[in-house]
Amino acid sequence: MNRTWDEEFWRLLLVLAVVLLLFFLFDHFFVWLSLGLGAYLGWHLRQLNKLSDWLERRITGDAPHSKGIWEDIFIRTSRFRARNKRRHKKLVKRLARFQDAAQAMPNAIVILNQENSIEWCNTAATRMLGIHTKNDIGQRLLNLVRHPLLVSYIDNAQYDDPLIMPAPVDETRTLSIRLVSYGDDQMLLIARDITRMQHLEQMRRDFVANVSHEMRTPLTVINGYMEMLRDGASLSEKENNDVLLHIDEQAIRLQAIVDDLLELSRIESSSHTKLRELVEVPLLLQSIIDDAKELSNHQHEFIVEIDNQLKLQGSEIEIRSAFSNLVFNAVRYTPAEGIITVRWLHDQSGAHFIVIDNGIGIPAQHIPRLTERFYRADAGRSRHSGGTGLGLAIVKHILQRHDASLVIKSSIGIGSEFHCDFPPARIAEPCHTTVT
């Protein structure tokens, strides 16, 4: 028995002692006993009323003053209140941290109750699902997002696999939605934007199909001629030479495809640690232009404007590959007697390599996809010109590794412009422009 209960026991004994004393003095034992116990009970009821008032005020303010067991009750209740308040603050902080973390997530998060009504959602839910964090709390999810795929998904209650559906606010975007049960019949909805992933997967499928197609054509030609030779076909010397020439052309084409694929793979897998060597761009361009003139068989007019002091920090091998791809493409797709302009200059925004031709031009709808692997605006003409369909993909990746960008402008029958724009940080020794 603790101290407070001891005090209470002695207080009760004191009341009984007073009752006995009054009984010996005045008789009427039960009268004095009733009065004594009534006073004792009344005191306890008064303390109970104090506790009730304190609880009614949600235990705010100081604890009521009392004695004995009630003093102990008030002290213990006050301590419990303090502990509960501290615990409540911790829970509020944890909830705030959880909500902050959920708000920072790129995925949409929605908490649903057992009636599929919204209890909470993050800002990404507004962007992906059109659910507003304030106005839509308490609304049923299916009243706000009425897509039939989501309705069927929730009605079937089979959540092992995610639901793939267009975003309600933008049907060009694709969402992956999962529902997870937790707690007391609550659901957690997580929506993830997989548009880019689907695009990359489509690009992967296209790449496999395209590379198979690109390699199948020369292989079919080679196999056809080889089968004809194995069957002992009677050929004249000229026919035999033509067959060997065609086989050689297709083998060279296969080799070019493999070389470009290996080059693209090397660029994508290489680190950026070796991209700070000094690149003598003017000398490099002069070499590329000499090669381009040989490729064109001197059938094109070249206008060259080069800043002879403008150099870059980067990889000379990769810069040569990117610039030569653009210049050689201009030669391939510009008719004889056409004009090809090559510029290398700088301004406040950085260094710029520009190739302009007055060739056949490119339809506007094809320009956004020109840097995809094996993408061709005109497949027949591209193969006839000897291109592999990987050149601009290589250019794009090289420029990205050098913090640069590729801008393409073109008009049918007028020609094309290719701009490689390098940031100022990549310029090694900028100087005044010199035209050669």
Image: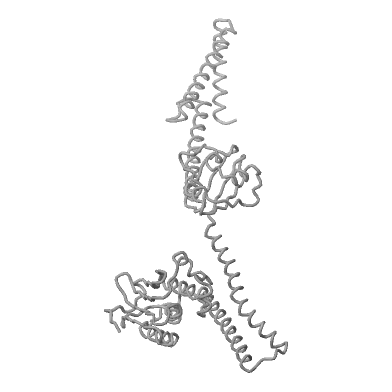
Vertical position of residue 169 compared to residue 79: above or below = below
- The residue nearer to you, when weighing 198 against 243, is 243
- Quadrant of the image containing the N terminus: top right
The quadrant in which residue 402 appears is bottom left
Q: Could you say where residue 196 lies in the image, as x and y percent from the top left?
A: 52, 60
The quadrant in which residue 354 appears is bottom left
**Which residue is outermost to the left?**
432
The total of numbered circles placed on residues is: 0
Q: Could you say where residue 224 lies in the image, as x and y percent from the top left?
A: 67, 82
Does residue 407 appear in the picture of this structure? no
Vertical position of residue 294 compared to residue 373: above or below = below
Vertical position of residue 260 compared to residue 7: above or below = below
What residue lies at 57% left-to-right and 10% top-to-bottom? 34
- The residue nearer to you, when weighing 395 against 192, is 395
Q: Could you say where residue 3 lies in the image, as x and y percent from the top left?
A: 55, 30
- Quadrant of the image containing the C terminus: bottom left
Vertical position of residue 306 compared to residue 137: above or below = below
What residue lies at 61% left-to-right and 89% top-to-bottom? 244
What residue lies at 47% left-to-right and 52% top-to-bottom? 104
Does residue 277 appear in the picture of this structure? yes
Q: Could you say where residue 128 lies in the image, as x and y percent from the top left?
A: 50, 49
What residue lies at 39% left-to-right and 80% top-to-bottom? 338
